[in-house]
Amino acid sequence: MITEFGHYALILAFVTSLFGATVPLIGAHYRWRGWMAMGEPAAMAQFLLTFGAFAALTHAFVTSDFSLRLVVLNSHSAKPLLYKFSGVWGNHEGSMLLWVLIVTAFGAAAAMFGGNLPPSLRARVLAVQSMIAAAFFAFSLFTSNPFLRLVTPPFDGQDLNPLLQDPGLAFHPPFLYLGYVGLSMTFSFAVAALIEGRVDAAWGRWVRPWTLAAWMFLTVGIGLGSWWAYYELGWGGFWFWDPVENASFMPWLIAAALLHSAIVVEKRESLKSWTILLAIIAFGFSLIGAFITRSGVITSVHAFASDPERGVFLLIILAVFMGGALTLFAFRAGAMEAKGVFSMVSRESALLLNNILLGVSAFVVFIGTIWPLVSELFFDRKLSVGAPFFDTSFTPFMVVLGLILPIGAMLPWKRAKIGKAMRSLRGAFVLALAVGALAFALQTGRSALGPVGLFLGAWLVSGAAVDLFSRTGRGGFGARLRRMLRLPRADWGKSVAHAGLGVVITGIAGLTAWEAEDIRVVQTGEPFSIAGYDLVLNGVQSVQGPNYRSTMGDFTLSKNGRVISTLHPEKRIYPVAKMPTTEAAIDGGFWRDVYVVIGDPQEGGGWAVRSYYKPLANWIWGGTILMAFGGGLSLSDRRFRVAAGARKTGRGPQHGVAAE
């Protein structure tokens, strides 16, 4: 009965989304207030109905209702409760239901908190959001129905993919989807503004919180996925340039560019066309990510499905929304004339350069991701584009971005003198240079990657601190420090996010430049060393888990004769799924990780063991947390919560860009 309720709720939500996509739009065109107001209850109804459908599917997974096909394929009665919950979205059909739930949640949030928007813009935003929801409701119901029943239910299920039975992967998809789908709101604002033919400072202020929220969620989602790959897959890496990893990274880069360009629209009413285009492209990359993971065109450990029919449906959605939005942009772009003028040396120019670097780097990742498909389709050649291409082509853009970021943050609007900004940053530059020189002096026979990375990281962190301190005016150090604590949260958020990027760069550079790896066959009781640390295999035992069997090693980690910890790496076998997984054992620390993986027993005795020394590994995820925290600080700023009063319909003249 509950399952049928969920199915009917999903159908009703689809019908409601069609209503919400048409009636408010017609009302906005003819200025019929009653019709425009229908967008709000339609958005709320879509969310409540979709939430009911999602709750019904969750109930089926938690209670192991094996009359539901999806539960049979992705669950098992012996599976721990956490993974029964995560099994709801750990598959194609359930993940799409989560996707459309988040689409409707953002629409409902816009309906609830968009009271400061002019009625016509609000109606159009909600209508476009309902169009997106309707497309994915149709996709879910017609190609990926999660509520299909089985005539003869089996006694038990086939279990969830063992790689997904992990806390990191339980929370990674929801955060990633909140970021992906959050960009649908920026798309809806962009299309609504194009329909109205009006983009001004108030629009920039309204669109920034949605962009910031999407970027923040994407940051957390990407960080969780990277952390999971690091400790779960057993190869010791944090990023593989996998096509699906790239599919989440590209919208993150474009969202970062959009976030900065929206500031220019709000403050100076410049870069309007560019900001609208970024909003369209950002959501376009999100749709491309959905296509890559579900069409089967690219093979990946992250892929949900490989059904060409679903891929064609998603390709149609991508073509309709991107084609329609870009066509509308082509008609309206000429009307979005920039008001603010600025010199070559100004904060506007620095933000524009920031946008160019982020946009080009996203394009480079896109080319590397899609080129194997293009090569096979048009040239009948199978190619593999791996980490060397991405490292070589992507890294220079990030180095330049890291160099200019502290300088650009210090420049005033409209017209600036770069020498004045550099004088303020002299101390930060000297500190960064000292850190890089120290790293160069301590290493022997290594590449310049480590020192350059540490220089950039220190430059970004110290530059962010100087930027924050420079906003406190003049006076004694104590008085300026007190004023700094009272600065707006948006100022703190920007500096914390920039510092977080510096910490991430430091971690990546340190880990990549100075890691050590050891692969050997180890006998019980035999000691071996890696990077000054001693490891001893004390023994190996078999362990029975709730739904797996494990071969668990017992290692003692010590240094200079002092025992540091005991490590227990595992190799698990899931009998139902008939699939092995590797569970690395990691002794984590502020400065380094010692990482141990146990393999198969060897014919001559002993066990295959891989061990790694990972310097500054945790700085990568610590910096990711800092970036997301900075986004949260900015989002909590009072200026984002207070209604923007620059545009009110029916109260005097409106200043913006006319459509005609």
Image (spheres, rainbow, N blue to C red):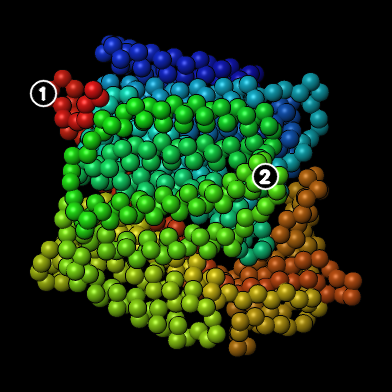
Q: Is residue 115 left or right of residue 371?
A: left
Callout in the foreground (1, 2): 2
- In the rendered image, the quadrant that contains the N terminus is top right
SS at badge 2? helix
The foreground one among 30 and 103 is 30
Q: Is residue 313 left or right of residue 361?
A: right
Q: Residue at x 42, y 46 (%)?
A: 254
Residue 517 vertical placement versus 654 (above, below): below
Q: Position of residue 23 (x, y in %)?
A: 38, 13
Q: Is residue 15 left or right of residue 502?
A: right
**Could you tell me if the residues under marks 1 and 2 are in contact, i.e. CB atoms within 8 Å?**
no
Under mark 1, the amino acid is Gly
In this figure, which residue is indicated by the disc labeled 2? 379
Residue 389 vertical placement versus 84 (above, below): below
Judge the density around disc 1: few (<14), some (14-19), many (≥20) Cα neighbours within 10 Å.
Answer: few
Q: Residue at x 45, y 58 (%)?
A: 624
The foreground one among 361 and 146 is 361
The foreground one among 74 and 424 is 424
Q: Which mark is residue 295?
A: none
Under mark 2, the amino acid is Phe
Q: Position of residue 102 (x, y in %)?
A: 48, 33
- In the rendered image, the quadrant that contains the C terminus is top left
Closer to the chain start, of discs 1 and 2, is 2
Outermost residue toward the right?
Answer: 603
Q: Position of residue 336 (x, y in %)?
A: 26, 33
Q: Which mark is residue 652?
A: 1
Residue 377 vertical placement versus 30 (above, below): below
Residue 228 in sight from this viewpoint: no
